[in-house]
Image: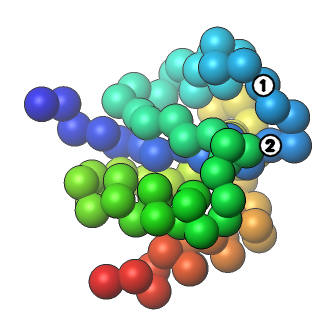
Amino acid sequence: MQTVKYIFVNDTRSKNDDRAMRRRVSDFKRYILVNSHELSHEELVNRLVSLRFRHPNARILGLSEIEGECICASEAMNRLRRELSEWP
């Protein structure tokens, strides 16, 4: 079983197709992509908690935070990560 290094959340305003989203994260290896547009906030949090339980060392990042090879934290994703940190 391969180790998942990243859990990406499609937090962008546009509902891109899977192929376009995967192209954006193609330089990152071993990731899971979650489309937040298909889930309510509660469902998104539950899904991320479940994924984090299975992959505790994976970094949770939003697609909006990826700018080329740089990662620039966003306030919205920081709020989501803080909310996730409150879960056991």
Quarter holding the N terminus is top left
At label 2, which amino acid type do we have?
Thr
Would you say residue 17 is visible in this rendering? yes
Q: For the residues marked 2 and 1, what is the alpha-carbon distance in whole angstroms?
A: 9 Å
At label 1, which amino acid type do we have?
Asn
Going 56% across and 61% down the picture, which residue do you hit? 43
Q: Which residue is mark 1?
A: 16
* Furthest residue toward left: 1
The percent coordinates of residue 67 (x first, y second) are: 74, 37
- The quarter holding residue 3 reads top left
Foreground of the two, 40 or 15: 40
* Furthest residue toward right: 13
Foreground of the two, 15 or 78: 15
Disc 1 on helix, strand or loop?
loop
Answer whether labels 2 and 1 touch (C-beta < 8 Å): yes
Q: Which residue is mark 2?
A: 12
Foreground of the two, 34 or 74: 34
Answer with left or right where residue 76 lies relative to residue 39. Answer: right
The percent coordinates of residue 53 (x first, y second) are: 27, 62
